[in-house]
Amino acid sequence: MKKILLLIIVVLNSIACSSVKNLPKEVKTDLDADFFKNQFTGLFVYNPKSGDTIIDYNGAKYFTPASNTKIFTLYTAHKLLPENLPTLKYLVKNDEIYIEGVGNPASLHPYLKDSTAISFLKNQQHINLYYNNLEDSKYGPGWSWDDYDTYYAPERSSFPLYGNVVTVNNEGSLYVSPDYFKENISLINAQQRRSMHENKFYLNPSKKDTVEIPYITDSIVVKGILENILQKKIKITSTFPEGEKKIIYGIKADSVYKRMMHVSDNFIAEQLLILSSSTLGDKLSSHKAQDYILENDLSGIKQNPRWVDGSGLSRYNLFTPQSMVFVLDKLYEEIPTETLFDIFPTGGETGTLKNYFKGNPKPYIHAKTGTLSNNYCLSGYIETKSGEVLIFSFMNNHYRGGSTEVKKHMTPLLEWIRDNY
């Protein structure tokens, strides 16, 4: 019996040692505080110059990453997409032009406003739209079904327009974009902003703020929006002719990446994975892009993730702090530092970090947030007072309450790392 008890103690000690390594006393004291005891926390810090692991606290354990998933999406897009993003594929045959989308999120997007595809199509006649090239479902695995009418969960599609949302404002007069949906807006105070199965939208007449509502995407809707803009008829075709397709290229990729990372735009993230797959074949599939990058550029990753969507909306995603740092290190090696830090939000200054992790006297964190109810993660880069750049992933799951207290307890830990390395 004593031997069995001793064996259990040895095993438990080895498990503890395997999940908590290189832990400075000051960091251990903070992580041992009562606040962290009733949640699951992981912190991994790495020096890319020396190759040294600075801190490893549950670094090899799996966490729900929330929008930290976008770091993997960013790396996939960086590896597979050109400097200017593909926006349309086409082929001309017998005086007819056949077009298909490639998943580019920027076309007429409310913020990105890329009109490249529209400018091209304005000069074309006899347009045939092929819409059957996307293998993904409209929603990602594990997405919450009741988010269908919320701005952060637009449908995924092969030919997105206007960010796949209707932008509505009733201040003074009714503003609707795209104008194609103007007759579908009802000024009533409804429980939902859109009917679940129809493009019928509801706006509270007493509210004057701008609202973005996802619309249902299909070939008929895309055809209608394009016809409304171009003022010409478009045919829907069930087949795409044989032949070499040509590609129209749109806006700079970095501007799209920055928007995705700064405001944690789920739609852009999902579409970038789909767009990345367009470089691997004619059929669009986010899974194809994920599989390719994991099998090739990220083949050295130690803990293979469960990676189910591009945005992190799904709670099915599972990543470790070590795997986050692995990809962040790849980005640090392959993208000029100034450009990379501009793509990520900066503590106290930009994006989702504008009000948090402020530096004194200057910013020291460039990182991606990841927030779902009861989950808050932060992964990116720390500029230390000694001039080093450290790569970190700080993941918190299963806490009760809001993320504000979590950030408050993370701050002194991150500042200590900044000041002591």
Image: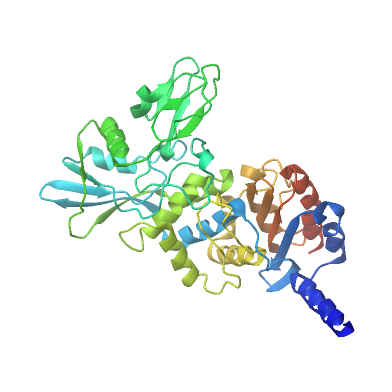
Tell me where residue 247 appears, x and y as whole percent.
29, 54
With 220 as the anchor, is 147 left or right in this view? right
The front one of 419 and 320 is 320
Looking at the image, which is closer to me, 150 or 87? 150
**Quarter of the image that includes the C terminus:** bottom right
- Give percent across and percent down for residue 18: 75, 74
Residue at 43 percent of width and 43 percent of height: 155
Q: Is residue 171 left or right of residue 225?
A: right
> Compared with residue 210, is residue 158 higher up or lower down, i.e. above or below?
below
Farthest residue to the left: give it: 94
- In the image, farthest residue toward the top: 172
Extreme residue toward the right, this view? 2
Can residue 357 be seen from the camera position used here? yes
Instruction: Residue 361 in the image: state x and y as whole percent.
Output: 77, 47
Quarter of the image with the N terminus is bottom right
The scheme the figure's colours follow is: rainbow
Measured from the top left, where is residue 12 in percent x and y? 80, 74
**Does residue 421 appear left or right of residue 190 in this picture?**
right
Residue 152 shows in this picture? no
